[in-house]
Image (spheres, helix red, strand yellow):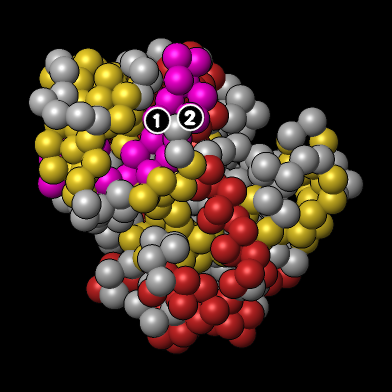
Amino acid sequence: MSLTLADARVVTPDGVHDGWLTIEDGRITHVGRGSAPGPGRSLGGRYVVPGFVDIHNHGGAGGSFPAGDPEQAVRIAALHARHGTTTLMASLVTASPDHLARAASALADLCEDGLLAGIHFEGPYISKARCGAHNPSLLREPSPGELLGLLKAGRGHVRMLTIAAELPGALDTIREAVANDVIAALGHSDADYGQTLAGIDAGARVATHLYNAMPPLGHRDPGPVAALLQDERVTVELVNDGVHVHPAMLRLACRAAGPGRTALVTDAMAAAGAGDGTYDLGPLKVEVAGGVARLAGGGSIAGSTLTMDAAFRRAVRELGLSLPEAAQVTSLTPARVLGLDDRLGSVTAGKQADLVVLDGDLEVAGVMKHGSWITEP
Ligand SMILES: [Zn+2]
């Protein structure tokens, strides 16, 4: 079965070209310029960008990954797929080791089915001073042995651990994570500049939502932000929803790290695609008003209601990224973080046919995963 998409504006790493592409057995087989050589389905001049890769996501459509409930997880993945996310990590939040093990085991089935790209433990080895929307009474001291047990429960599908580098045992726990093919991410951390560098030296390669839940950038006290932005080994996550971080600070981070080390993430919670109201985020209650999620009682920001298509539009309009750069920070760079950039992340012959069709306003008109339409344009 071969499908040709014609009259497209194809967003590739080296520019935007008027052209066409063919898809066979779930893969992109050709990307060409000008008119398609044979009959094809016209996209009417709409853009084709690579399917979005969201490496930090807690929920949507009323469902929450931290619940560890496959039915909710399926609903979340469907919501975000309609918004163009074809590769999705399920982020848990701080909970008891028992709960985390159960949730990881339940979600591992969906990783095996290919619905989820992996599981992300955000906590419990994070700072009380920077715990944000994590329950402080459930935080734990990092323990390589305990982590190993949790990884076992996830049957190889736990792919990321957010940890605070300054905690006792953190560096050994980072080394243990990396030795088990888990990406160590620094965040929810009160570390200073030097402690952050030590975490990177121990193997950490990602900054969990840079700026949020960490000390700010200071000119005499550079803190974790400067360490994470400057280090070529680190990819920084940014929540580009207009709430978590001021656009000027997002532009600063994008320029400092460049699109090759910047990954936009949603950090979405249950209210994404579901409207205002009261929701659970793990063991805590969250109130969502005007699309902004905060801990009940007017506390800290508690995830977002963002979807990746909105993050893409904001990248172009608010951050001034070109379309290829916006595709890079929403797809290729996060795919590289997961070690999947040989298969995913760009509209290139040989890669998996995970595509988003965007209209002239950059709104989603169609979504394809593995060569099959999720939403047909
Ligand atoms: Zn999160």
How far across and how far down the image is residue 261, in percent? 29, 36
- Relative depth, front residue between 228 and 78: 78
Q: Does the magenta stretch include residue 236?
A: no
Any mark on residue 291, and which?
none
Q: Name the residue under label 2.
A: 365
Q: Mark 1 points at which residue?
A: 357
User: What residue sits 22% from the left and 16% below the top?
Assistant: 18
Q: Disc 1 residue type?
A: Val
Tell me if 96 is positioned left or right of 227 in this view. right
Examine the rendered structure and indicate whether residue 31 appears above or below residue 350: above
| 113 is higher (above) or lower (below) than 241 | below
Residue 347 colored magenta? yes
Quadrant where the image shows the C terminus: top left
**Residue ID at (23%, 35%):** 4
Measure the alpha-carbon separation of dots 2 and 1: 5 Å
Question: Residue at left 34%, top 39%?
Answer: 355
| Disc 1 C-beta below 8 A from ligand 1 | no
Seen in the image, is 281 located left or right of residue 169?
right
Secondary structure, magenta segment, majority class: loop
Q: In which quarter of the image is residue 94?
A: bottom right
Residue 165 seen from this side: no
Q: Residue 224 or 123: which is nearer the viewer?
A: 123
Disc 2, disc 1: CB below 8 Å? yes
Span shown in magenta: 346-368
